[in-house]
Image (cartoon, rainbow, N blue to C red):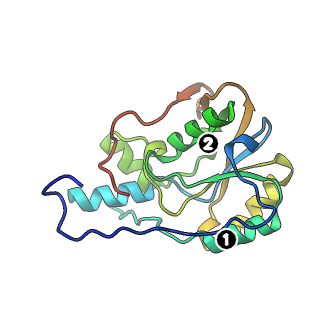
Amino acid sequence: MERGNADGLYINTTGIGAVPDGVFLGSERIKPGDVLIINGNIGEHGIAILSQREGISFETSVISDCAALNHMLVELLQKFNSVRFMRDPTRGGLATVLKEAALASGTDFLLFEKNVPVSPEVSGAAEMLGLDPLYLANEGKVLIVASPEEGEEILSFLRSYPIGEKARMIGEVREGKGNVYMETALGGTKFIDMLSGKQLPRIC
């Protein structure tokens, strides 16, 4: 924290866990043909925090998506063997996490804009503020890369949970060299890179 920008109270936490036997996750397991899945709308936390910090009000309030995902994800890993990779798209948003994973795996990711879930409230607020929801922080979201054979079953499983009821298959993995592209709603192709600079002040 910068001097003078905190109220004097600092809390540092550490999460400790164990990887279950037989579970192997990592970017090196991502393969061309795999599908990209997210468990719900993006950008809600970033807009919620920004509105509170800056005193900005919108016609409809945006609520942070903070949620505990551990119970859902433990069961996910118990039920499905084809989950290759999972990551929380917090700082830098979904776009930055996708770019990092694509670079680490040496593959290309193709997003379908029409499938990326963004609520009308977040979309409207982001447009008004000149922000891109792909780069907004999330707290209750997880990006999942899995085999296409189990993609639909994983979607159905996530949607059985309140924190996954808006889950969507947002893209696919292709042969490549670490690039991320998005097929736009108009049929064009947009290059997606990591967040450059700060779209928002640090919030996590």
The amino acid type found where label 1 is placed reads Met
Give the label, 1 or 2, closer to the camera.
Answer: 1
| Helix, strand or loop at mark 1 | helix
In the rendering, at what x and y percent does residue 19 appear? 69, 64
The amino acid type found where label 2 is placed reads Lys
Check disc 2: other Cα within 10 Å, few if <14, some if 14-19, many if 20+.
few
> How far is disc 1 from disc 2 in space, using C-alphas?
26 Å
Rendered residue at 81%/48% (across/down)? 147
Residue closer to the observer: 20 or 44: 20
- Residue found at the very far left of the displayed protein: 4
- The numbered dot on residue 114 is 2
Q: Quadrant of the C terminus?
A: bottom left
| Helix, strand or loop at mark 2 | helix
Rendered residue at 61%/42% (across/down)? 114
In the rendering, at what x and y percent does residue 18 appear? 66, 68
Residue where numbered disc 1 is placed: 72
Eyeballing the image, is 100 above or below 63? above
Does 19 sit left or right of 124 as displayed?
Answer: right
Does 8 sit left or right of 146 as displayed?
Answer: left
Q: Is residue 61 visible?
A: yes
Q: Quadrant of residue 20?
A: bottom right
In the rendering, at what x and y percent does residue 174 appear? 74, 31
Rendered residue at 72%/39% (across/down)? 172
Check disc 1: other Cα within 10 Å, few if <14, some if 14-19, many if 20+.
some
Q: Is residue 57 visible?
A: no
Eyeballing the image, is 105 above or below 35? above
Q: Earlier in the sequence, mark 1 or mark 2?
A: 1
Residue closer to the observer: 157 or 87: 87
Rendered residue at 72%/41% (across/down)? 28
Q: How many marks?
A: 2
In the rendering, at what x and y percent does residue 123 appear? 44, 48
